[in-house]
Image (cartoon, rainbow, N blue to C red):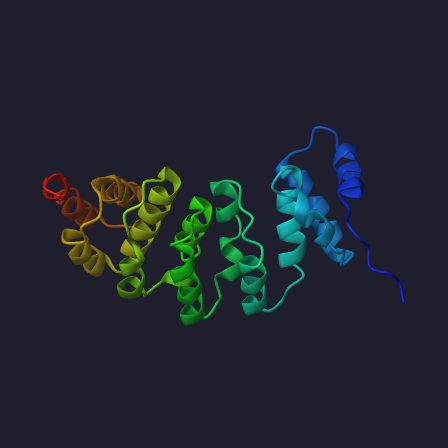
Amino acid sequence: MEERKILTPQSVQQDLDALGQYKTADVDRLIRRYVKEQADAAPLREHILTEQQFHRIYYYVNLQQIKDVAARMAFIHNNLLFTDWWHTDQIIRYVAALNFEMAIGYARKYIHSDDPFIRRWGYVMFISRLGHGHAERLLPLMKADDHYYVQMAQAWLIAELTIFEPEVVHQWMKSCGLPYSICGKAIQKICDSYRISDDWKVKFKALRPELKAAFEKL
C-alpha cells in the first residue's frame, strides 16, 4: 500500500516557489493535486497563523477530503485559526448543508469569543442556504460589537435574511436596539442587493432616522 503524502512546510513552499509569481487560481490547482493524492496537511497547522501562504492550503486540502458535512464543521471548530475576514468567509460553502440546529449551537458560542474573526464566523457561516428561512432564530444572535469586521458580518447576514424574509427582518429592526453602526450598514447592504425589491428598500431606508434617534437616546 502506497504511503500517504505528507505536506510539510518545506515541501509545500517548494511547490509554491515552483509556481513562480502565482495567483489564487494556481494555488487552487495545487490544492486539487494534493486532494487527488489524498495528502496529509496536518504538519501545516502550526504554521498557518504566521505563514499565511499555507492557510488556504491547510483548510482546503483537509475540507475537500472530508465528505460528511458534520465532520467538516467539527474540523473547522477544532481549527478556528483565522487571521482576517477573508479566512472566515472562504469556508462558508463547506458548511452550507449542515443541520441548522447543530450550526446555531456552534454559533451561540462563537459570537461570544474574544477573537473578532471567530465572532465574524459565527455570523457569516449562515450566509448560504444554511440560514435561509431562519431569520427568527438568527436575528436574536445579533449584539453590539465594536469590531468593524464583525459589524460587517452582522450587516451582511441581516441583508441575506432580508432577501427571503423581509417582513420578519423589518419588524425586528424597528426595535432591535442595535447600534446604528450595525443597522446602518445592514440597510446599505439591503439597498445594494439586486435580490431585494425596491419597495422593501424604500421601507428599510425610512427606518434610518428612527434608528439613529433611538440609538442617540441610549
Q: Is residue 110 left or right of residue 141?
A: right
Name, please, the residue furthest toward the top.
Answer: 21
Quadrant in which the N terminus is drawn? bottom right
Quadrant in which residue 138 is drawn: bottom left
Q: Is residue 1 at all visible to an observer of this figure?
A: yes
Number of marks: 0
Residue 203 image offset from top left, x and y in percent:
14, 48
Residue in view at x 48 percent, y 67 percent: 98
Q: Is residue 160 above or below residue 136?
A: above
Name, please, the residue furthest toward the front.
Answer: 114
216 and 124: which is toward the camera = 216
199 and 102: which is toward the camera = 102
Q: Is residue 129 at all visible to an observer of this figure?
A: no
Quadrant in which residue 65 is drawn: bottom right
Residue 216 image offset from top left, x and y in percent:
12, 38
Q: Is residue 14 above or below residue 142?
A: above
Residue in view at x 46 percent, y 50 percent: 118
Quadrant in which the C terminus is drawn? top left
